[in-house]
Image (cartoon, helix red, strand yellow):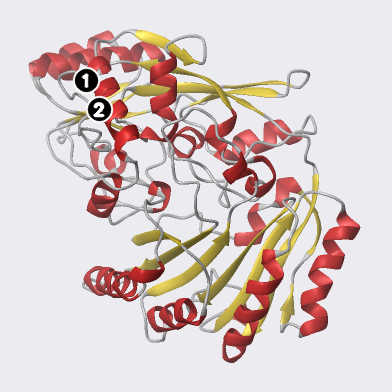
């Protein structure tokens, strides 16, 4: 450990980890095994004061500062940075009467959901409870309650932020409103270190959710019916259409191992009888091979998508669609055709409250109501390049069908940085750049999204 790193260690409650430390390799690695920083110093912060010390240290030694909670999404990977781990900032306080929660930056949505459901409330989490709540929210945040209530960032009341000069500020509609505007959509680690946020909660306890599995050979019929059916759904119901390749692995239920399906999945957070009737329309059209739709506690909503919890070498890519037609399905079937490293291609039905909520925020991708995400797993060396090439060919084929902008939460690595250039309209980007110059004039947080003009 260098002399300066040792002096930092003397000033903080948490740990300072350098490349010669036996815990370094584990500490630097996030959830996605394809991406990781190789920092000069890792600060495993135990408090907000530790984050302040790390920010001031990075400025002192002239290093960029990166932030990681769970490591699900990286804007880029880099060396010689100061990496701040916020995983130990895991406090949560739920105010049942006010229907709010104050959430530490280290918490995953699973912890927030558990605390909120205990008092009959729900946060606007995504499909996976293992994703960091704060970073997810800073990038947008669309989940199973999205069409009814909007994006997670639409319902943030305030952030506590450590800025580049080491000051700790509140960002809200009343305090530092420009920073508050920029953080909601400007992405994590670009403007400061968000150490906690206060969010609204919603009275959702019981939902009707699950999946209908159809044989892959029925994909075209399922897609056509889904396109018509989903267009008329109420905002209480959020759904998706998925082509899924289940790997032949023990973590997959035996009936699904090594098989591919066309899947309709969804979650209805309103009247359960109405919800059952809507899904019955699909059942009446054609009985699925496997029917997993049922009434459930919203605390069980992670079972709808069953996203993997264990770290994987995964590559995600996503774009907004201007509409659905046979060309879109053809492109999806091509990219998922076996043998393929693509795990799934999923079209999410957005719209509803996401479009209606025109809150003052930097996030501006509200114009399209269908979002296509393609995720693959590179278990073997060399598959990463094949996976990226498949995704690129698909987007090239679908170019006429793509809507402007991007959903940055589903992008990683260099693709995420490039997409950030197009994710904001010119006026939004110009305002972001102005705020960036004000709060981070020396680009200390240069490892996040590129918010310059």
Q: Quadrant of residue 374?
A: bottom left
The quarter of the picture where residue 379 lies is bottom left
Name the residue furthest front.
427
Query: Residue 200: x, y in percent?
Result: 65, 27
Marks 2 and 1 sit apart, C-alpha to C-alpha, by 6 Å
| Quadrant occupied by the N terminus | top left
Q: Mark 1 — residue? A: 437
Q: Is mark 2 on a helix, strand or loop?
A: helix
Q: Residue at x 31, y 25 (%)?
A: 191
* In this picture, residue 270 sits left or right of residue 379: right
Q: Is mark 1 on a helix, strand or loop?
A: helix
Q: Which residue is drawn at 29% across and 50% down?
A: 419
x, y (%) of residue 445? 23, 27
Q: In the picture, which quadrant includes the C terminus?
A: top left
In the image, is residue 148 above or below residue 242? above
Q: Is residue 281 above or below residue 260?
A: above
The answer to whether residue 353 is left or right of residue 314 is: right
Q: Which residue is label 2 attached to?
A: 433
- For the view shown, which residue lies furthest in the right direction? 273
Q: In which quadrant of the rendered view does residue 28 lie?
A: top left
Is there a contact, CB below 8 Å, between mark 2 and mark 1?
Answer: yes
Q: Which residue is drawn at 77% across and 32% down?
A: 118
Assess disc 1: are there few (<14), some (14-19) or many (≥20) residues with their C-alpha within 10 Å of its C-alpha: some
Residue positioned most to the bottom: 217
Q: In this view, does 360 lie above or below 48?
A: below
């Amino acid at each position: 450990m260098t002399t300066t790193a040792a002096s930092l260690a003397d000033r903080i409650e948490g740990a300072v980890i350098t490349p010669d430390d036996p815990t370094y390799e584990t500490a630097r690695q996030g959830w996605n095994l394809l991406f990781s920083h190789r920092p000069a110093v890792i600060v495993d912060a135990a408090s907000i004061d530790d984050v302040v010390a790390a920010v001031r240290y990075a400025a002192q030694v002239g290093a960029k500062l990166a932030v990681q909670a769970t490591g699900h999404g990286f804007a880029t990977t880099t060396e010689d940075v100061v990496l701040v781990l916020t995983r130990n900032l895991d406090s949560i306080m739920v105010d049942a009467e006010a229907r709010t929660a104050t959430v530490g930056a280290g918490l995953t949505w699973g912890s927030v959901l558990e605390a909120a459901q205990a008092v009959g409330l729900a946060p606007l989490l995504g499909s996976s409870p293992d994703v960091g709540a704060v970073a997810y929210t800073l990038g947008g945040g669309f989940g199973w309650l999205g069409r009814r209530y909007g994006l997670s960032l639409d319902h943030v009341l305030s952030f506590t932020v450590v800025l580049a000069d080491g000051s700790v500020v509140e960002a809200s509609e009343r305090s530092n409103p420009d920073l508050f505007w920029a953080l909601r959509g400007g992405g994590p680690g670009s403007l400061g270190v968000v150490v906690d946020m206060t969010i609204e909660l919603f009275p959702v306890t019981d939902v009707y959710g699950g999946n209908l599995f159809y044989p892959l050979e029925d994909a075209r019929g399922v897609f056509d019916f889904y396109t018509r059916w989903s267009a008329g759904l109420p905002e209480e119901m959020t759904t998706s259409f998925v082509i899924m390749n289940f790997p032949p692995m023990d973590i997959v239920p035996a009936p699904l191992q090594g098989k591919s399906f066309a899947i309709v999945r969804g979650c209805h957070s309103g009247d359960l009888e109405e919800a059952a009737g809507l899904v019955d329309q699909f059942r009446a059209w054609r009985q699925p091979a496997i029917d997993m739709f049922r009434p459930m506690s919203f605390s069980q909503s992670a079972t709808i998508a069953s996203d993997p919890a264990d770290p994987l070498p995964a590559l995600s890519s996503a774009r907004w669609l201007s509409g659905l037609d046979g060309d879109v399905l053809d492109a999806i079937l091509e990219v998922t055709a076996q043998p393929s490293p693509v795990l799934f291609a999923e079209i999410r039905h957005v719209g509803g409250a996401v479009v209606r909520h025109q809150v003052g925020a930097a996030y501006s991708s509200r114009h399209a109501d269908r979002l296509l995400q393609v995720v693959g797993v590179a278990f073997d060396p060399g598959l990463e390049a094949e996976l990226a090439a498949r995704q690129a060919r698909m987007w090239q084929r679908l170019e006429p069908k793509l809507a402007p902008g991007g959903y940055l939460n589903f992008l990683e690595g260099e693709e995420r940085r490039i997409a950030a250039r197009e994710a904001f309209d010119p006026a939004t980007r110009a305002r972001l750049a102005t705020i960036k110059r004000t709060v981070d004039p020396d680009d200390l947080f240069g490892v996040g999204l590129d918010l310059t003009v």
